[in-house]
Each structure stands twice: as structure tokens, then as C-alpha cells.
Image (cartoon, grey):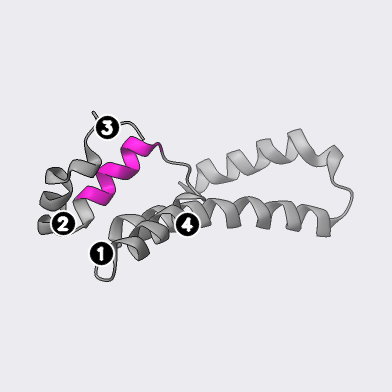
Amino acid sequence: MGLCTKVEALEWWKANRHRHHTWKDVKEIINTYYENYNQTDQAYNEIVALKQTGTIQWYLNTTARLNAYLSMTDNRLITIILNCIPSCIRLAMAQSENLSTNQVE
């Protein structure tokens, strides 16, 4: 893994060194890249680990906020949400007429 990272970093440097004239510029761009990368990873881990213990609205708002870093598709996010909420709520959602695909609002 370390060798791969070194090779990738060297390739990035070769392709981008003409854009950065100071060490400060290089540090800022690297920090921005890895901060965003880690933030995405962290957001995914938080969504998967998140359990609905408060209100459903709080849970959905929290997953939506975290998904802003990920931009997961609705289907993927719904699958995660359904796996993380209590089964009694899943059952109530499945039986709810408000969630029927036949209704148009």
C-alpha cells in the first residue's frame, strides 16, 4: 500500500507541479484532497453505524446531512435506512397508505 501511495503521489506531482509555486500551495492542495477523502469515508461509516433511537425525523435529517458528503443514490440510502431502523417502524412504513406507490400528490 505504501509503495502504491508513493507512486500515486509522484505521478500527481509530475502532472501538477507547474501549478504550484510554493510549498504552502502544495500543502494546501494535499490537505484539501485528503480532508475531503477522509470526510467522505467518515460520513459513510457514520451513516452505516447510525441507529434510529430518537425521532424518525432526526434520523432522516442526520442521514441526509451525512449523505451530502457522499451523494449516494436514493435506492442505496433507502436500503441503509431500512436496515438501521427498528423492525416495528419498518413494518408500520410498509403498511402505511401514505407510502403507497399508487398515490400521486
Q: Secondary structure at mark 1?
A: loop
Q: Nearer the viewer, residue 51 or 90?
A: 90
Which residue is denoted by mark 2 in the rendering? 89
Rounded to the nearest whole Å, what is the CA distance between mark 1 and mark 4? 15 Å
Tag 3 or tag 4, which sits nearer the N-term?
Answer: 4
- Structural crowding at the residue carrying mark 4, measured as other residues with C-alpha within 10 Å and reported as few (<14), some (14–19) or many (≥20): few
Name the spot of residue 18 as percent of width and height, x first: 86, 38
Which residue is denoted by mark 4 in the rendering? 65
Question: In the shown orientation, is residue 96 left or right of residue 21?
Answer: left
Tag 3 or tag 1, which sits nearer the N-term?
Answer: 1
Residues in magenta, as a range: 73-82
Tag 2 or tag 4, which sits nearer the N-term?
Answer: 4
Labelled pair 2, 1 in contact (Cβ < 8 Å):
yes
Name the spot of residue 85 as percent of width and height, x first: 20, 57
User: What amino acid is labelled 2 in the image?
Assistant: Ile
Q: Which numbered marker is on residue 23?
A: none
Q: Which numbered marker is on residue 52?
A: 1
Question: In the shown orientation, is residue 19 left or right of residue 82?
Answer: right
Q: Which numbered marker is on residue 103?
A: 3
| Residue 81 falls inside the magenta stretch | yes
